[in-house]
Image (cartoon, helix red, strand yellow):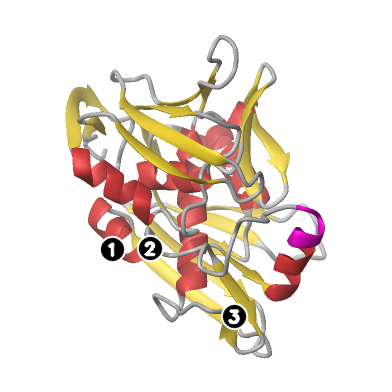
Amino acid sequence: MIQPGPQRTLAAPISVHGIGYWSDRDITVTFMPAEPDSGLVFVREDLPGKPRIPVRPEYRIAIPRRTSLEKNGARVEMVEHVLSALKGMNVDNCEIRVTAVEMPGLDGSAADFVTAFDSVGYEEQNVPQKQWLVTEAFTQKDPDPTRSRFVSAAPAEELQISFDIRYGQKSPIGNQTAQITLSPEVYRNEIAPCRTFVTRQEADAILKAGLAKRATYQDLLVFGENGPIENTLRFPNECARHKLLDIIGDLALLQGRLFANVRAFCSGHDLNALFVKQILERLV
């Protein structure tokens, strides 16, 4: 049996301001310390009654290209980077107050969230973390049999994650792999700075749909034929590292600490959600 560590929250409130990628709105998200066992909870301060949306798998809804939650008609969208930062920095309990449906996109990474958390510090709480211990290997395959995507898990005494992406040798993104053993130090230095990425064709389609009008080439990585447009990579495999950032955020739906060796191959938010569901079915 792995000895559980103490739960953790932030030592003081802290706010982060930015623009929503999809909505183009100015947004403020304020992270508040929270009581033990309260978990991660979003609060829509802009709505009547300030409805609360707990970070739980049953509140996840399917919206393309992002992780979103909804309870009783109140919704928050593109929450994966916020949740990834909290999960990566081992924060169990936090009230996340937001002024809009969408989270600020910032530079496409989680670095500003981590910097904000570090500025106020963390507080250990005298209650043990909930644990999810994988005791036998399993694989969540893509429901579409024509696709080879999967996420697998095997027993481990820590959370190890690897991610493979395959864009092909002719793509400027190419084929990449990234792997880590998750800890706050590793997350802060090796994962949090890694940014959202799209191809120029994808970016043009998004703009044609009337979305992301305020986003620039400095707000995320947009890949043209010769690499990032008006931007430079922070790591040679930054795209694979960002996919690690995303899956860490999706694993936050578990509300606890996962001990497993996780391998993801070309997965996305939809498949990550099915993986979380399978963990719950196997381990509850």
Q: Which is more toward the observer, 46 or 109?
A: 46
166 vs 97, left or right, is: right
Residue 258 visible here: no
Type of the residue with mark 2 = Pro
Q: Which residue: 51% across, 38% down?
A: 27
Secondary structure mostly seen in magenta is helix
| Secondary structure of residue under mark 1 | helix
Dividing the picture into quadrants, the one containing residue 128 is top left
User: Residue 150 location in percent, x, y?
Assistant: 63, 60
Task: Check residue 205 for magenta coloring.
Answer: no
Mark 3 and mark 1 in contact? Answer it, CB < 8 Å: no
Disc 2 secondary structure class:
loop
Could you tell me the amino acid type at mark 3?
Ile
Q: Distance between the residues labelled 3 and 1?
A: 22 Å
Q: Please name the amino acid that badge 1 sits on.
A: Asn
Q: Residue at x 67, y 84 (%)?
A: 168
Q: Residue 2 at x, y = what percent?
A: 25, 40
The stretch of residues the image draws in magenta is 206-210
Q: Is mark 3 on a helix, strand or loop?
A: loop
Q: In this view, does 12 lie above or below 52?
A: below
The residue lying furthest to the top in this view is 49
Q: Nearer the viewer, residue 273 or 89?
A: 89
Mark 1 and mark 2 in contact? Answer it, CB < 8 Å: yes
Q: Mark 3 points at which residue?
A: 173
The residue that label 2 is drawn on is 193
| Number of dots carrying numbers | 3
In this figure, which residue is indicated by the disc labeled 1? Answer: 189
